[in-house]
């Protein structure tokens, strides 16, 4: 019998890859989506789509109890739903912290209790590492998030670490790229057009992971990871920010003009835009805020992901060079460049 695995946030970038990987590993996959979700699955995909009302607790309990009656208990659950952008700071806490807490309560109340719930968190929960020593971030370090996004991810980690009534695993991916991503493609397009912009005039250490390696790690940890343990996931290497541009340039065979933009004036402009938004659109937050700029321009996002690859007994399939080649080929084949 295939074990039942429920995946939330199934329609998103990482969620779609988690579905593919879980099917490959032989799980009976249930894709949890909201009513508003636009989940598109390839034809003949053996996935059961279930709708969950995360914001109506009584209904959520009823839905989970009914699903147990119909299909049996979910042996595993990957809680991947989350937001990285929000119109209001409170939204981060609502979706990334309170929602999974409600889900856990509903799982217990419906007696649909998984053997393991794996939460997809983020390195933003830790915040950037020390910029003097440049020591890579590891799971033993204290969490010092510098954004509301990171604070919401830290809050849900604290909930699991101190109060979870069910076994869990916390996974902290670093920056994720790959087919179907909508963030890195903007940088690729700029380079294709001959521009190579960098925020900050200083050395910046970055870590990254191709989405296929992240999905492989997450699904692998369901079986191989220890209960109540935390894992940072990257491709195991740390890069300086210019390596990303150089690799993309090489793949696209492009020459570029490098633009090094100092952080301070960008922070002033972002501050000004935030003030304007408060007056003309108080319910909205601009795409670039001061805290987002501080987060993406932090000097040390290097991390230590040795533990996850040791536990999985393998190495990631992609480093940045092969992962970017695969991603850019995918963008190209799908008419996105
Ligand atoms: N992308 C990265 O670089 C990165 C890095 C580290 C961690 N993460 C984490 O990985 C997870 C997935 O991220 P992603 O990049 O795949 O994002 P994504 O493409 O935006 O997908 C997130 C999914 O979450 C669900 N969702 C969105 N808003 C929600 C709300 N208000 N209430 C409930 N569910 C909601 C949606 O699924 P449905 O519509 O199907 O319900 C959505 O497709 C998130 O938890 C994120 O914090 C991402």
Image: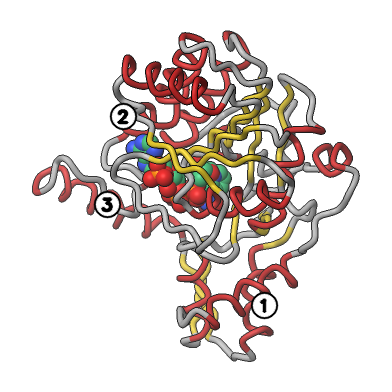
48 and 122: which is toward the camera: 48
> Which residue bears the numbered disc 1?
246
Real-space Cα separation, disc 1 to disc 3, in angstroms: 30 Å
Mark 1 crowdedness (10 Å alpha carbons): few <14, some 14-19, many ≥20: some
Question: Do the CB atoms of the residues marked 2 and 3 lie less than 8 Å apart?
Answer: no
Indicate left or right for 111 with 98 as reference. right
- Closer to the camera: disc 2 or disc 3? 2
Q: Quadrant of the N terminus?
A: top right
Q: Considering the numbered disc 3 on the image, is that residue within a helix, a strand or a loop?
A: loop
Q: Position of residue 112 (x, y in %)?
A: 54, 17
Q: Residue at x 58, y 36 (%)?
A: 120
Indicate left or right for 137 with 274 as reference. right
Numbered circle sitting on residue 197? none
29 and 15: which is toward the camera: 29
Real-space Cα separation, disc 2 to disc 1, in angstroms: 38 Å
- Closer to the camera: disc 2 or disc 1? 2
- Of callouts 2 and 1, the N-terminal one: 2
Q: Is residue 210 visible?
A: yes
Q: Position of residue 74 (x, y in %)?
A: 59, 26
Q: Position of residue 179 (x, y in %)?
A: 57, 66
Q: Considering the numbered disc 2 on the image, is that residue within a helix, a strand or a loop?
A: helix
> Which residue bears the numbered disc 2?
90
Q: Residue at x 38, y 27 (%)?
A: 93
* Colour scheme: secondary structure
- Of callouts 1 and 3, the N-terminal one: 1
Q: Considering the numbered disc 1 on the image, is that residue within a helix, a strand or a loop?
A: helix
């Amino acid at each position: 019998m295939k074990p039942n695995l429920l995946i939330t946030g199934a329609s998103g970038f990482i969620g779609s890859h988690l579905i593919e990987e879980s099917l490959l590993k032989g799980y009976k996959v249930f894709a949890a989506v909201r009513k508003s979700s636009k989940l598109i699955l390839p034809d003949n995909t053996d996935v059961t789509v279930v709708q969950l009302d995360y914001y109506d607790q009584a209904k959520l309990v009823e839905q989970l109890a009914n699903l147990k009656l119909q299909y049996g208990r979910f042996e595993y659950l990957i809680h991947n739903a989350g937001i990285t952008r929000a119109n209001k700071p409170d939204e981060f806490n609502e979706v990334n912290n309170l929602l999974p807490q409600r889900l856990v309560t509903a799982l217990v109340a419906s007696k649909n209790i998984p053997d393991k719930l794996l939460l997809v968190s983020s390195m933003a929960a830790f915040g950037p590492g020390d910029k003097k020593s440049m020591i890579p971030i590891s799971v033993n370090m204290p969490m010092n998030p510098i954004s509301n996004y990171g604070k919401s991810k830290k809050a849900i980690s604290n909930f699991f670490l101190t109060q979870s009534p069910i076994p869990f695993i916390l996974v902290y991916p670093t920056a994720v790229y790959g087919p179907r991503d909508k963030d890195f493609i903007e940088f690729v397009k700029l380079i294709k057009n001959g521009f190579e912009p960098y925020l900050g005039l200083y050395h910046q250490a970055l870590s990254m992971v191709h989405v296929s390696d992240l999905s492989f790690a997450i699904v692998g940890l369901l079986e191989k990871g220890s209960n109540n343990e935390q894992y940072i996931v990257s491709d195991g290497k740390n890069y300086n920010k210019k390596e990303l541009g150089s690799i993309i340039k090489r793949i696209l065979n492009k020459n570029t003009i490098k633009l090094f933009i100092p952080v301070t004036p960008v922070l002033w402009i972002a501050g000004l835009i935030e003030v304007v938004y408060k007056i003309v659109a108080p319910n909205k937050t601009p795409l670039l805020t001061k805290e987002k700029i501080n987060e993406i321009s932090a000097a040390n996002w290097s991390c230590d992901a040795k533990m996850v690859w040791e536990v999985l007994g393998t190495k990631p399939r992609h480093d940045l060079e092969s992962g970017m080649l695969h991603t850019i080929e995918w963008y190209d084949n799908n008419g996105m460049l």
